[in-house]
Amino acid sequence: KAGVTQTPRYLIKTRGQQVTLSCSPISGHRSVSWYQQTPGQGLQFLFEYFSETQRNKGNFPGRFSGRQFSNSRSEMNVSTLELGDSALYLCASSLGLAGGLNSGELFFGEGSRLTVL
Amino acid sequence: AQTVTQSQPEMSVQEAETVTLSCTYDTSESNYYLFWYKQPPSRQMILVIRQEAYKQQNATENRFSVNFQKAAKSFSLKISDSQLGDTAMYFCAFMKPLFLSAGNMLTFGGGTRLMVKP
């Protein structure tokens, strides 16, 4: 079974630009979550999508947005990039259903490393 | 809001020895999940072990075990017979179950960098 795939793995942007990151979840998983990882703030939850609907959202400005497609693939977009947006962006997938032996277990991709200059 | 605290930013252990990583958390919920995730230098986060709060029995997975103290809100990870491949960042994480939350959301601690020395 293929794991969570994130593209691109590395990218460099300049301030003011926008960026789109992609995540393909494990087959059969309907929930996709996004996390930002920085040395200063650690791992912070951005948002979660389930069956094409945003189900949960972290405390990030509106420049951060996402969406999920009918095949459960997800994209996140950051507009008007700032230097502080430089981070590793992690995507995680899960079944997303309540109950069951594996409730809450998330499977992570390798991340997209964004550098903003 | 939930908070997760890992008080040991860095630790080291000799190969084959045992090491314990500490984690405390704060929540008003009685039902929740706790996790330890490992992030090796290659960056992919891997689930090490999972504990459901309603279960009194401590979870174990091969060389990994936890000491879950619900009243003290403590969730430590013990790694026995440490191996070089255990070198990684270890994150403690908290999640409310779906019936108490709008969706899946992990709250992470700051992490502990573990170095296993030969």
Image (cartoon, rainbow, N blue to C red):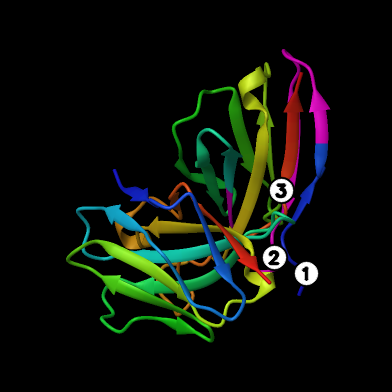
Q: Which residue is mark 1?
A: A2
Q: Which residues are magenta?
A: A11-33
Foreground pick, B29 / B7: B7
* Same chain shared by disc 2 and disc 1: yes
Q: Decide: few, some or many residues near mark 2? Use Cα within 10 Å; few <14, some 14-19, many ≥20.
A: many
Residue placed furthest toward the left: B71
Q: Secondary structure at mark 1?
A: loop
Q: Which mark is residue A26?
A: 2
The picture places residue A10, in percent across and down from the top left corner, at 82, 39
Residue B95 location, quadrant: bottom left
At a point 45% along the width and 37% down the height, the residue shown is A58
The picture places residue A73, in percent across and down from the top left corner, at 71, 52
Residue placed furthest toward the top: A16
Q: Which mark is residue A54?
A: none
Q: Are marks 3 and 1 in contact (CB under 8 Å)?
A: no
Residue A30 in sight from this viewpoint? no
Report the amino acid beneath label 3: Gly
Where does the N terminus of chain B fall, quadrant-wise? Answer: top left
Is B83 situated left or right of A3 in this image? left
Badge count: 3
Q: Does A37 appear above or below A91?
A: above
Q: Are marks 2 and 1 in contact (CB under 8 Å)?
A: yes
Report the amino acid beneath label 1: Ala
Q: Decide: few, some or many residues near mark 3? Use Cα within 10 Å; few <14, some 14-19, many ≥20.
A: many
